[in-house]
Amino acid sequence: MNPHISWQGVFPAVTTQFRDDLSVDVDATAQVMDALIADGVSGLIVCGTVGENCSLSTKEKIAIMEAGRAVAKGRVPVICGIAEFTTAFAVETAREAARIGVDGIMVMPALLYSSKPHETAAHFRTVSKATDLPVMVYNNPPIYKNDVTPDILASLADCETIVCFKDSSGDTRRFIDTRNMVGDRFVLFAGLDDVVVESVAMGAVGWVSGMSNAFPKEGETLFRLAKARRFDELMPLYEWFMPLLHLDARPDLVQCIKLCEHIMGRGSFRTRPPRLELPAADKAHVEAIMKKALANRPVLPDVGITRG
């Protein structure tokens, strides 16, 4: 574990809640956060992909960061996603996060521009040097088109504030390649729901999870079983969970996750354009997966989850 942080376990990528007029509902978002903490999750990611970062104004991001810090009250770490079009904008947001006092930032590559490897590295290096907050590097090439390869990550090993790597490529070999290059320099986090057990087996100590918004106890239990190598107990849970976890790998993952969250009574299905409500066939598909899952919801093994 990196000496600068103690991040481990399940960190749901919290959904941002919107009113009927699509304005941000900070109070409802805070309630979502509080319910997740009560159900035993290990941390929170606010303003991530699932939090619709790119659909939020800077003022709205600040309000959500402030709400996260106020709700958590130090019970769990709160990390804020930074997804901006330019390095300068990312630096500004990082400085706001430091001013508010969240526990860290999750930095995405500069969006829209398909950067060369040295440009991708320079973006992370510049943002990390602008703050004393610990930085999680977020790699999601299917969504953001820029791939933070193990080579790029290794080139950032001299940046003291970069402490964590979240990989959503789905290629769990990345964790081994990274360790072979720089040892235990970075704390490793799974970023794609439907390879979480494989990621833990390859060394991930945390999971930024989408579907744990709807099923936080199941998510935290699955992760802890994987960490403890209790495979006989985790496999029935993983097999039950997998159709839901696959939804996290879709381009419309936010709409899918929010619909599941809505069905569970934990939040609203509303998303802000350009994300629109799921078409009828897709909505029926997600509802059918949820109906089957809830009809066969497993009894969870004891993994020591407390709170409430």
Image: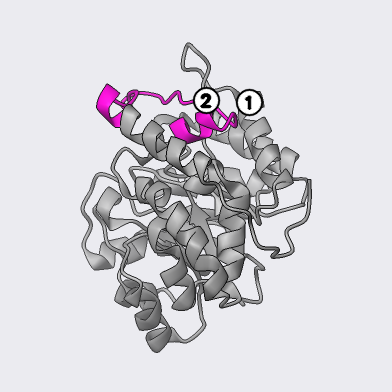
> Which element is circle 1 on?
helix
- Colour scheme shown: one colour
Examine the image and state in which quarter residue 166 appears.
bottom left
Answer with mark 2 or mark 1, whichever residue precedes in sequence: 1
Residue drawn at (51%, 29%) of the image: 263
Main SS, magenta residues:
loop
Give percent across and percent down for residue 56. Answer: 45, 30
Q: Which residue is mark 1?
A: 28
| Residue nearest the viewer, comparing 70 with 270 | 270
Give percent across and percent down for residue 184. Answer: 51, 83
* Crowd class of label 1 (few under 14; some 14 to 19; many from 20; radius 10 Å): some
**Which amino acid type corresponds to the residue marked 1 in the rendered image?**
Ala
In magenta stretch: residue 261 = yes
**Extreme residue toward the front, this view:** 295
Question: Would residue 61 be seen by someone viewing this image from the given angle?
Answer: yes
Q: What quarter of the picture does the N terminus occupy?
A: bottom right
In magenta stretch: residue 50 = no
| Residue nearest the viewer, comparing 24 with 168 | 168
- Residue 17 located left or right of residue 118: right
Task: Say if mark 2 contacts mark 1, CB within 8 Å.
Answer: yes
The residue segment tinted magenta is 258-282
**Extreme residue toward the top, this view:** 21
Camera-near label (2 vs 1) is 2
Distance from Cα at disc 2 to Cα at disc 1: 9 Å
**Which amino acid type corresponds to the residue marked 2 in the rendered image?**
Ser
- Residue 255 located left or right of residue 73: left
Give percent across and percent down for residue 23. Answer: 50, 18
Q: Which residue is mark 2?
A: 268
